Image: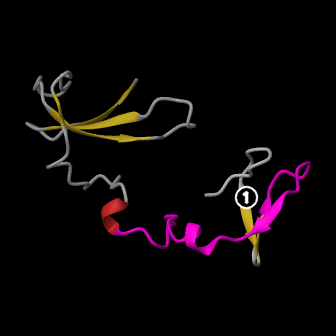
């Protein structure tokens, strides 16, 4: 993602130009293909970069939280992963899976 040097808004590709999305600014510049090659797009992502969120998700091997208690069996360890489920200025949500019984829940910070 590229941002405008003048106003900080996102830039978008328009042919061989990068154009500011802020109508009041209107800055444009030549596309820098070398710089763009460092950007990660959804087309270039591998399966390893995708966060698994299905019910069958394999949590084993993920970090383990020891500061929680499973409501189902009382175990004090659970695998967890973080996901940004709200806007960027909100804290991420932790999704847990009990290492003992497999019960799943989410925790909000």
Quarter containing the N terminus: bottom right
Q: Could you tell me which residue is drawn at 19 percent across and 21 percent down?
A: 67
Numbered range of the magenta stretch: 19-46
What secondary structure characterizes most of the magenta part?
Answer: loop
**Residue 65 counted in the magenta span:** no
Image: 92 above or below 44: above
Q: Quadrant of residue 102?
A: top left
Q: Residue furthest bottom?
A: 15
Question: Which residue is located at x 25 percent, y 56 percent?
Answer: 56
| Residue situated in front as seen by the camera: 64 or 78 | 64
Q: Where residue 100 appears, x then y in whole percent?
A: 7, 36
Could you tell me which residue is drawn at 52 percent across and 66 percent down? 41
* Colour convention: secondary structure
Above-or-below relation of 64 to 15? above
For the C terminus, the image quarter is top left
Q: Quadrant of residue 48?
A: bottom left
In this rendering, would 68 be left or right of 33? left
- Residue receiving disc 1: 11
| x then y, percent, for residue 9 | 74, 48
- The answer to whether residue 103 is left or right of residue 108 is left
Instruction: Name the image quarter holding residue 96.
Output: top left
């Amino acid at each position: 993602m590229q941002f405008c040097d003048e106003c900080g808004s996102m830039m978008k590709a328009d042919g061989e130009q990068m154009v500011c999305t802020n109508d009041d600014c209107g800055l444009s510049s030549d596309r820098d293909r070398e710089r763009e090659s460092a950007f990660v797009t959804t087309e270039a992502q591998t399966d390893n970069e995708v966060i698994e969120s299905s019910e069958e998700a394999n949590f084993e091997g993920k970090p383990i939280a020891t500061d929680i208690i499973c409501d189902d069996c009382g175990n004090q360890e659970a695998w967890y992963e973080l996901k940004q489920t709200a806007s960027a200025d909100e804290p991420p949500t932790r999704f847990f899976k009990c290492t003992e019984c497999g019960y799943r829940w989410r925790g909000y910070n």
